[in-house]
Image (spheres, rainbow, N blue to C red):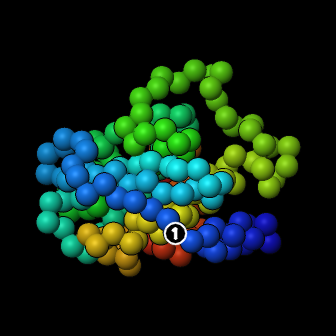
Amino acid sequence: AFWTEVVNEARDVPLDFHRSLRNAYDHPGFAVEEISFRSIAGMTLHGWFAYPEGARRAPAFLWIPPYGRESLLPNAYGTRPGYASFSLNFFGHGAFHREEYVPARGYFAEGAAEASTFVFRRMFQDLLLAARALQAQIEVDEDRIGAMGMSQGGGLSIWMGAWCPIIRAVVAD
């Protein structure tokens, strides 16, 4: 019942996103643009959207970050020939934010005393919104979207596969 409520709450939030429509990162073979969207908590989250130049209705995946506050960069793991991909920063930092992990900046226990305030509840709901934003892109085949990630990203990918009907495949490392 808890997770059904969490999913329904995210589903009912109006999707509010902005796409830059300009190349923001040099990654050969791909156009890489920024997408910003309103999170479940009302803050603006930033990510990058990579797609093969000229793509229309390509399969796509969410590239979900591992534990930490930095953004993943477009690379050979987060972009694949023939696929579009979208990765986000969960904490409102820029799409290409670099930050070395330090334990003092960890967040695992934030809000854990109450299930409704646990940080992973918010992160999961933001992924549900990110999946909707990815699905809305013209370059993406809305029926062929997966979730991929390592570590925390792998766990959240499994969660997405179980609870998000947009997600049709999962690769969890």
| Residue 173 appears in the picture as rendered | no
Q: How many marks?
A: 1
- Location of mark 1 (residue): 15
User: Going 67% across and 34% down the picture, which residue do you hit?
Assistant: 107
Image quadrant assignment for residue 76: top left
7 displayed left or right of 51: right
**Residue at 49% across / 38% down in the picture?**
93
Image coords of residue 168 (percent x, y): 45, 72
Image: 170 above or below 99 = below
* Circle 1: residue type: Leu
Given the current orientation, which residue lies at the most extreme right position? 113
Q: Using the image as rendered, state which of residue 86 and residue 171 is in the foreground.
A: 86
Residue 59 left/right relative to 39: left
Residue at image coords 78%, 50%: 117
- Within 10 angstroms of label 1, few (less than 14), some, or many (20 or more) residues? some
- Measured as percent of width and height from the top left, residue 167 is found at 48, 70
Say above or below: 125 vs 63. Answer: below
Above or below residue 34? Residue 170 is below
Q: Is residue 8 above or below residue 93?
A: below
For the residue labelled by badge 1, is the local secondary structure a helix, a strand or a loop?
Answer: loop
Residue 134 visible (yes or no): yes
Residue 111 falls left or right of residue 95: right
Q: Residue farthest to the bottom?
A: 143
**In the depicted view, which residue is nearer to us: 119 or 153?**
119
Expressed as whole percent of the image width and height from the top left, the position of residue 150 reads 47, 44
Residue 20, image quadrant: bottom left
